[in-house]
Image (spheres, helix red, strand yellow):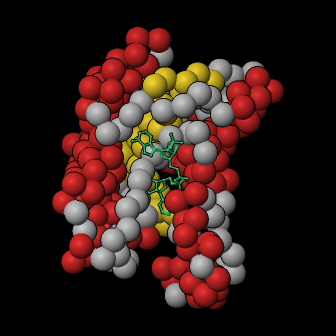
């Protein structure tokens, strides 16, 4: 065991995490968890810093900053990476932000397919490359990507989303194979059904909501905060020998 594993296996004091999409939902829950574990956070997102995140950082005595990022634009992603790296050493990258578009596969516009793949897969690779390269050069870093149950299952009316989340898992494993020997851990978490804006339509459909809840062994939808512990673990020294996994955080859905 190294010193950090012995003295503070889950602590993140002195570390700085970049989190995409920390404005709301799962990303906000993860950013709050990282702050509470002692990390400084850079929120890469379209809007201003969430007030809850600013307050939590102040309370914990760490910093929280916002940097502008639009995942639909390659130049915005590139600028967000260089703007962040100019002011911060990034030890942890959480690729949380993502999007979902629903249509029957017969009618799925290719422009929407490209949009989902661009945000959920291509931009994730660009961010891994931009933040991962200095980590590889330093010989230390943690990258955590957001996969999905649709990394494992096909879903219905979301073919682009399922394809993009399959890509996230393969990207995670591909980067693990290149970067684990260079001291960088690349892993993913796969949330189950989490009550966020992304699932507004499912939550509003009483019958579908009931069917989903009945299949979850934990007997409830998850919250953004339910992902925080798994991400803090993967970002910490406790997970130094964990590489290339896709960790389900799904209330037991996949076990059913
Ligand atoms: N909710 C679930 O059940 C579930 C399950 C499995 C996986 N996931 C994954 O978990 C992650 C977070 O999901 P969520 O449920 O928290 O979603 P959400 O509530 O819809 O929030 C999406 C986040 O992504 C950001 N975002 C979307 N498009 C963006 C763009 N073009 N540029 C920059 N930011 C963008 C949003 O920013 P704005 O606030 O600016 O819109 C927001 O912060 C996603 O990768 C999702 O696929 C979610």
* Residue 68 locus on image (x, y percent): 46, 25
Give the camera-side residue of 195 and 200: 200
Left or right: residue 88 versus residue 155 is: right
Left or right: residue 218 versus residue 144 is: right
Relative height, residue 185 to residue 167 (above, below) = above
State which quadrant residue 78 falls in: top left
Left or right: residue 26 versus residue 56 is: left
Give the camera-side residue of 115 and 109: 109
Q: Most extreme residue toward the left, as rendered?
A: 110
Left or right: residue 238 versus residue 190 is: right
Relative height, residue 176 to residue 108 (above, below) = above
> Which residue is at 33% across, 30% downward?
77
> Which residue is at 42% across, 30% downward?
69
> Which residue is at 33% across, 20% downward?
79
Give the camera-side residue of 203 and 152: 203
Relative height, residue 248 to residue 56 (above, below) = below
Q: Does any portion of residue 183 appear in the rendered image?
A: no
Give the camera-side residue of 116 and 64: 116
Q: Most extreme residue toward the right, as rendered?
A: 59
> Which residue is at 60% across, 51% downward?
25
* Residue 230 locus on image (x, y percent): 57, 54
Q: Does any portion of residue 68 appear in the rendered image?
A: yes
* Residue 253 locus on image (x, y percent): 54, 79
- Total label count? 0
* Residue 223 locus on image (x, y percent): 66, 60
């Amino acid at each position: 065991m190294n010193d950090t594993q012995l003295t503070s296996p889950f602590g993140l004091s002195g570390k700085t995490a970049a989190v995409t999409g920390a404005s709301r939902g799962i990303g906000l829950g993860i950013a709050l968890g990282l702050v509470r574990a002692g990390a400084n956070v850079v929120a890469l997102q379209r809007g201003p810093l969430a007030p809850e995140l600013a307050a939590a950082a102040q309370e914990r005595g760490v910093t929280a900053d916002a940097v502008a990022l639009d995942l639909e634009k390659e130049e915005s992603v590139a600028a967000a990476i260089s703007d962040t790296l100019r002011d911060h050493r990034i030890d942890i990258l959480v690729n949380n932000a993502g999007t979902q578009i629903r249509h029957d596969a017969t009618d799925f516009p290719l422009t929407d397919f490209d949009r989902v793949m661009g945000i959920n897969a291509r931009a994730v690779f660009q961010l891994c490359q931009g933040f991962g390269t200095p980590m590889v050069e330093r010989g230390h870093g943690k990258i955590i990507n957001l996969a999905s149950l649709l990394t494992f299952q096909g879903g219905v009316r979301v073919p682009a989303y399922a394809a993009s989340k399959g890509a996230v898992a393969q990207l995670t494993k591909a980067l693990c194979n290149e970067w684990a020997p260079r001291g960088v851990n690349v892993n993913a978490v796969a949330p189950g059904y989490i009550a966020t804006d992304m699932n507004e339509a499912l939550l509003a459909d009483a019958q579908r909501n009931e069917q989903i809840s009945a299949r979850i062994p934990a007997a409830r939808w998850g919250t953004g905060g339910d992902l925080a512990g798994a991400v803090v673990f993967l970002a910490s020294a406790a997970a130094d020998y964990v590489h290339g996994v896709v960790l389900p955080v799904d209330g037991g859905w996949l076990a059913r």
